Image: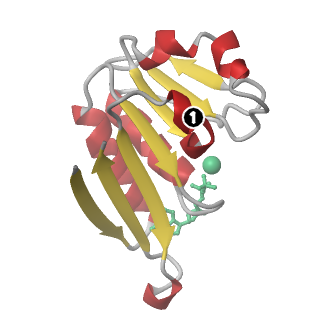
């Protein structure tokens, strides 16, 4: 298991970290994104999208489980499974076509669908540490 830790001190640094990942990520990669509300998941996702060459805003897929962006270097499949009631909802949308497809999957709240995650994925955890200041974030990237 390969673990990398990055510390950021403002939203721009978190955005830039996402952007760098977006510039280098390969198709077929599944990225899980874990962190409390307001920690910076959307900031990171916007950066990732920018790095993939996607212009325009990324909105959280509130009413659909997955939002598809195809204008970048490779497709981005942005999942938010926070409101999922049952794992069968993932079957209904045909998640395997995305997880094992030609794009990058970014899955927010992936801990809720742990049993269907692929064998290998990139886990991104974003955490605050208030003792380091309000805008400090620790980003831990683990290759699983
Ligand atoms: P989430 O999607 O996890 O709920 P958002 O990305 O929407 O969170 O919001 C994160 C908030 O925290 C934004 O208002 C952002 O400006 C702020 N923020 C402060 N410091 C950082 C940092 N180091 N990295 C990311 N966001 C930060
Ligand atoms: Mg968000």
- Say left or right for 77 vs 93: left
- The residue positioned 44% from the left and 56% from the top of the image is 125
Figure check: 143 above or below 104: below
Quadrant placement of the C terminus: top left
* Residue 51: image location, x then y, percent: 33, 36
- The residue positioned 70% from the left and 41% from the top of the image is 82
Figure check: 24 above or below 70: below
| Residue lying furthest bottom | 131
Figure check: 95 above or below 4: above
- The residue positioned 47% from the left and 30% from the top of the image is 117
- Say left or right for 111 vs 106: right
Which residue is at the front of the view, 100 or 42? 100
* Residue 131: image location, x then y, percent: 48, 90
Whether residue 13 is visible, yes or no, is no
**Residue wearing tag 1:** 58
Ligand 1 in which quarter: bottom right
* Residue 95: image location, x then y, percent: 56, 16
* Residue 121: image location, x then y, percent: 35, 35
**Secondary element type, mark 1:** loop
- Say left or right for 94 vs 138: right
- Quadrant in the rendering for residue 118: top left
Figure check: 65 above or below 107: above
Whether residue 110 is visible, yes or no, is yes
Which residue is at the front of the view, 106 or 15? 106
- Say left or right for 81 vs 12: right
């Amino acid at each position: 298991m390969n673990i990398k830790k990055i510390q950021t001190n403002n939203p721009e640094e978190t955005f830039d970290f996402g952007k760098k990942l977006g510039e280098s990520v390969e198709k077929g990669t599944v990225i899980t994104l874990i962190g409390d509300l307001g920690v910076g998941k959307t900031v990171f996702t916007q950066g990732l999208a920018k790095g993939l060459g996607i212009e325009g805003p990324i909105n959280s897929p509130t009413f659909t489980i997955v939002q598809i962006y195809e204008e970048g270097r490779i497709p981005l499949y942005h999942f938010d499974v926070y409101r999922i009631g049952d794992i069968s909802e993932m079957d209904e949308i045909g998640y395997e076509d995305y997880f094992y497809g030609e794009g990058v999957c970014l899955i927010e709240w992936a801990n809720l669908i742990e049993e269907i995650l692929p064998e290998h994925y990139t886990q991104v955890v974003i955490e605050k540490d208030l003792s380091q200041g309000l805008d400090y974030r620790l980003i831990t990237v683990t290759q699983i």
